[in-house]
Structure formats: C-alpha cells, structure tokens
Amino acid sequence: NGTIPLALSKINAVEYFDHRLIYHTEDKKKISAVSAREPFDIQAEELLSLGMFIKAANSYIVNMDNIHSVTARGFKMKNGAEFPVTRKYAAARDKFLKLKLGGQK
C-alpha cells in the first residue's frame, strides 16, 4: 500500500516471517514490508548497527529503548507486548541489563 514513514522509536520489534519483515509498533500494529530474498541478518544489519536494537531470536530483533522488563521467556515491552529470547540469543538479556545498569550500548 505504498511507503509508510515509521519513527525508529515507535518500533518495538522487527520479525522475519515468510521472507518479509514485519514491524511491530508501540500501538500494537503490525506493518509488513515487501518480500525480499535476502537473509534476515543482512536485512537487519542497518537497524542493529544503530545500537538500539538487539537480536533476541533467529527471527526477531527488539528495540531496547522500548523494553519494560526481562521475563523468563523474553522481553516485555512498555505496551505489554512480549517477544521471545531464545537460548541461542540468551546473551541479549545480559546486554540489555548491562545497558540499563551501566548506561552503555
């Protein structure tokens, strides 16, 4: 449906599903991007390079600025949404906690 401007601060998470990026927003909307054949890691590079996003699972990156708390299953966002942190990416929890406690990205 065309281009939708979206402030980074409004993005809670980006999910990779069926060759598409799905942007989960603060207002609990899901915005699906055009299908791409590049792997998720390549598509997510730009957001990850900003330092405010962290990879929490094979198919999720999460905006650390919008995280409210860390749960046993993952990250709970300020709007109540939850996104998983898998065992493979368990270090994401530590990185987030260091950021909050130490003030470094």
Image: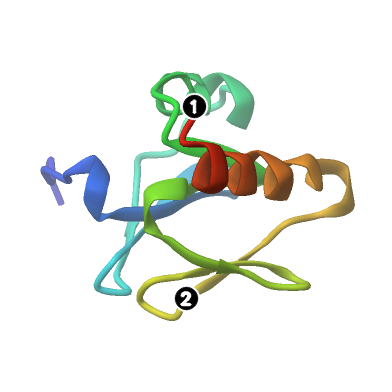
- Secondary structure under tag 1 reads helix
Residue 57 in sight in this render: no
Q: What is the residue that sits farthest to the right in this orientation?
A: 87
76 vs 19: above or below: below
What's the mark number on residue 48?
1
What's the mark number on residue 81?
2
Residue 44 in sight in this render: yes
Is residue 12 toward the left or the right of residue 10 in the image?
Answer: right
At horizontal 55% and vertical 46% (from top left) the residue drawn is: 101
**Which amino acid lies under the numbered mark 1 shown in the image of this protein?**
Leu
Residue 55, horizontal then vertical, whole percent = 63, 39
Nearest the viewer among 51 and 12 is 51
At horizontal 24% and vertical 73% (from top left) the residue drawn is: 27
Mark 2 Cα within 10 Å, few/some/many (few <14, many 20+)?
Answer: some
**Which amino acid lies under the numbered mark 2 shown in the image of this protein?**
Ala
At horizontal 35% and vertical 76% (from top left) the residue drawn is: 79
Residue 20, horizontal then vertical, whole percent = 49, 44
50 vs 4: above or below: above
The quadrant in which residue 92 appears is top right
Mark 1 Cα within 10 Å, few/some/many (few <14, many 20+)?
Answer: some
Is residue 81 toward the left or the right of residue 98 in the image?
Answer: left
